[in-house]
Every structure is written in C-alpha cells, then in structure tokens.
Amino acid sequence: MTTAPALGPLAGVKIIEFAGIGPGPFAGMVLADLGADVIGVDRPGGAGPFDLPVLRRGRRSIAVDLKSEAGREVILDLVASADALIEPYRPGVMERLGLGPDAVLARNPRLVYARMTGWGQDGPQSPYAGHDLTYTATSGILSSFVRDPHDGSMPRPVLPGPYLGDVAGGALLLVAGLLAALHSAAATGTGQVIDAAIMDGASYLSTFTHALRLGGMWGGTPGNNILDTGAPFYEVYECADGRHLAVGALEPQFYDELLRLLAEHAGLDLGPDDPRHRLNRLDQRRWPEAKALWEDFFRTRTRDEWCAFLERSDACVAPVLSLEEAPTHPHLGARAAYLPVGGEHGPELPVPAPRFSATPTQTRPSPARGAHTDELLAEVGYHPARIATLRSTSVVA
C-alpha cells in the first residue's frame, strides 16, 4: 500500500511516532494534518481499548515487536533518516528497549527526540500513572473551573474534559516544542531531547489566570470572579427550551449593545436601580442579584429566538451548540469548518486549523496497523527476502 504525497507546510518532514493514547496520537494527527510524513510504530496484533481511528489519520503504519533485538534494529534503521521521534511511555521504558535518547541520537544526531508523559521525566511522581484529571488537579488550573453554589459550601471544580491537559497542555505544546526543536536542528545540525509533561503544560496554561490574579482581577472564592462565572455578563444561561445561551458582553461597549438590543427586541427596560443597568455592571456585590434576574429573563424565550437578534451583533452572544449541531451553524458552514470523512455520507469532523494560503493542509485516511510495513522497510534498504524473514519470525506484521 502506498500513500499519496502529502500537502501542507510540513511536507518532507519525517516523524516516527510510537503508538500510545491521549496526547501522543493527537500530536501525531496535528503533524500529519500539517503535511508531515508521520510513521506510526504500532504493536503487532489488534487494537487497544482506547484506539481512536480519527486520531490515527494521515499516518503510514508499521507494526514492530519492540521487545525483539531485530525489532530494535528496524526502529534504529527507520530513525536514521527521520527528523523527529515521539514516544509516549513512562520514563525508562525506551531505555529498557534499547531505544532511549543515547542509542537513537547516536544513530541520528540531528533527530528531535520528543518524550510525552504526564508527570515528566523526573520528580517524585514521574514513575506513577495518571490521567488528564490528576495532572490538571496538581497543576492548580483545575481549581479555576468552578461554579459557586452560593449555599455556603466550597465550590466544586467542574471537569473540563480532556481538552485542557491532554490536548492543550500535552499534545499542542508538544507540537510547538517539536517544531521549535526542528528549527534549531536545521540551524545547528544537532538534535535534542524534549521533555513534554502534561502537568508542566497545564501549569503553563494557567499563566493567564496568574496574570489576572496578580492584576487584582481574580481571587477570593472561586466562581465569583469576572471570568469564572461570577459576572452576570459573562455567563451561560438556560432558555425556555432547555437549551443554553452564552453571553460574553465583557467590555462596556458590548454590554451596552446587549442592553440596546434587548430593549429594542425584547422590551427590557432597566431603571438606574436595576442591578443589570450599565452603571451597576461592575458592582460585584450586586452580581448574584443581577444574575438571578438575567436567569429569569433568558428563560422567557428559546435559544434560537434570542439568537435571531443577538447573535449577529457586537453583543457577544452565541448559542451553546452540541457537537451534532455545530456543523450546521451558518458561520461554520460558510467557512467549511466541518467536512465529511470517508465519503459524502461519512461523519462530519472539524478540518485542520489554522489555514495556510500557500501550503494548504489536508486530512488523509487512517491506516490499518502494519499497512505500510513492507513499503517502509523497502525505503530503508531491506530486500524482500529479509522482509519475509522478519514477517515469518513475527518481528514485523
């Protein structure tokens, strides 16, 4: 099986990616979408319980028994012509396989060796398991995702899903680091090791919250700040049909536009003593009262009825769409932000971002495990007879 030449700004960059879960596959998907030749090193056999075909798209796949000496040699031959490597294992695993940085960089000194873990390569937690939730909890950033129940109890953190740690703090910062290291290797001729930890990444993402805290815009009881559901003008409200409306009228001019449109289309008439009045918007003592009034008000119409006159304005209002609804939104449709995968009637998935004017990106299919084994071995000089021997001894599949 051969793969069509890639398009995109990373065309010509070869990356070896060892199979894993979570941030590793997402990073590999991003790099493949950007045009890199991502070679997925899979384990022989069936898929794992967390195998997600969408995240495997755009690769070429080779299945190798990493615990065999012959399998180790296959990997070293592959990395000899690669630009980067991504490995997702706990610290020490690659060294025990004979594929740690020392062995690999000895074969290819220009290689960027990227290590994706939860806790990092050192520190007291580094040998232990974890998940997005534990890393974001330890970093401190999870504590900022709260909603104050206003019943005297401490706010309970709201889980933001895997986007914060695995995707943003893990995969996307890994991609940024890898691209920066590739730039350095091109300039110096020398590769390096990247220690990418989800906990480090999540901590780094919290820099913005720390900036707000140091600037006096974040503090006290969580869930009572301007950007963490405390402010009534930066909140999600339930509508008459049970669906929700996001109101982000943060700046004064946007809040004024919100009030103007609500007065014009919904008959909202605020006196100067109303906590929702523009003169009272920054009085934090009145936020709970204002929020209660907004909650009652937005329940008087359906989500789409509100959006009919609020969405296309500077009021900063948007419908909270489900994953199924999002592809049908007029703006996303106009930008072709979702396209069907696997044929005209396949599931609609987001297209790669950002968009490039001269080197457009593309998505390519997800390969079967080992679909390119023979092709990749031939590229590094293996003769058919040697490939057949490796297959017959289950070194590759």
Image (cartoon, helix red, strand yellow):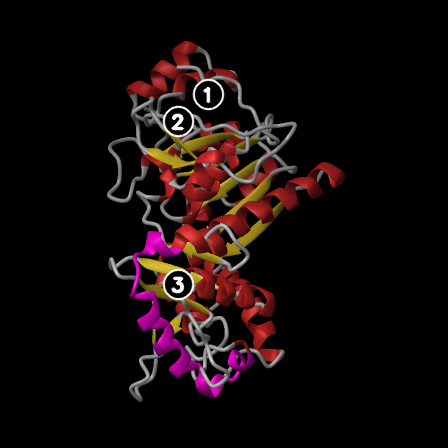
Q: Are marks 1 and 3 in contact (CB under 8 Å)?
A: no
Residue 373 can be seen in this image = yes
Q: Are marks 1 and 2 in contact (CB under 8 Å)?
A: yes
State the residue in front, 320 or 75.
Answer: 320
Numbered range of the magenta stretch: 279-306
Dividing the picture into quadrants, the one containing residue 330 is: top left
**Closer to us: mark 1 or mark 3?**
3
Work out how far the residue at label 2 is from the one at label 3, CA to CA, in angstroms.
61 Å
273, 102: nearer the viewer? 273
Mark 2 vs 3: CB contact within 8 A: no
Label 2 sits on residue = 62
User: Camera-side residue: 374 or 138?
Assistant: 138
Q: From this view, report whether residue 295 is shown above or below residue 371.
A: below
Badge 1 marks a residue whose secondary structure is helix
Where does label 3 land, which residue? 266
| Quadrant in which the N terminus appears | top left
Which of pointers 1 and 2 lies earlier in the amino acid sequence?
2
According to the picture, the residue beneath numbered tag 1 turns out to be 376
Which residue shows up at 55% across the image and 45% down it? 175
Q: Which residue is drawn at 36% across and 77% down?
A: 293
